[in-house]
Amino acid sequence: MGMNVGNAGGAGDPEVMVDINTTPLIDVMLVLLIMLIITIPIQLHAVNLNLPVGTPPASDVQPEIVKIDIDADSAVFWQGLRVADMAELEHKLAGLAEMTTPPDIHLRPNKAARYAVVAAVLADTKRLGLTKIGIIGSEQFVE
C-alpha cells in the first residue's frame, strides 16, 4: 500500500494501485450497526399497575375479602369451593364488579400452578374493573 514516486524502470507508466482501503468502510458499517441496535425499541413484557398515591383515609370498616386459590393442578377455588370452569369464575367476578364497594381479592396461586391460569384470573379481574387485588403466599417462592 505504497505510492510509487518517479519511474521505477524509467520507460513505462507507473503501475495503477488496485487495492481499496476497506478500513473506513468497516468503521462506517460498525457505526451504522451500533446505531441500528440502539434505535431498535426493546420489547418488554410488563404488567401496568396503578399504585395508590398518598395516605389512605382512616376507616374503621374492614373491607370484605374474597379468597381465590389456585392449587398445584391449576384448579381454581372461590372461598374454598372449587369453581367448575373459567366462565363460572368470570360470572362471580362480574357480580363483585357490580357492587358499590367491591371487596378486596386475595389471589393465592400454588407455585406449581400453570401461569396461564393465574394470568387468566388476573386478566379477568382487570377487564371487569376490579382493582383491589393482592397476591398472597409469595413466601412459598423463596427457596
Image (cartoon, rainbow, N blue to C red):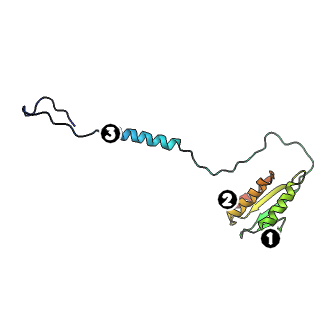
Q: CA distance from mark 2 to mark 1?
A: 31 Å
- Residue 112 in picture, x, y percent from top left: 68, 66
Residue neighbourhood size for the residue with mark 2, other residues' Cα within 10 Å, grouped as few (<14), some (14–19), many (≥20): few
Give me the disc on residue 142. Answer: 2
Q: Residue at x 78, y 56 (%)?
A: 125
Q: Residue at x 15, y 29 (%)?
A: 5
Q: In the picture, which quadrant includes the N terminus?
A: top left
Q: Residue at x 92, y 50 (%)?
A: 61
Q: Is 106 or 124 nearer to us in this picture?
A: 124
Q: Taking 89 as reference, is 46 above or below it?
A: above
Q: Secondary structure at mark 3?
A: helix
Query: Where is mark 3, residue-wise?
Result: 23
Query: Where is mark 1, residue-wise?
Result: 84
Residue neighbourhood size for the residue with mark 3, other residues' Cα within 10 Å, grouped as few (<14), some (14–19), many (≥20): few
Q: Secondary structure at mark 2?
A: loop
Q: CA distance from mark 3 to mark 2?
A: 53 Å
Q: Name the amino acid type tagged 2.
A: Val
In this view, the mark in front (3 or 2): 3
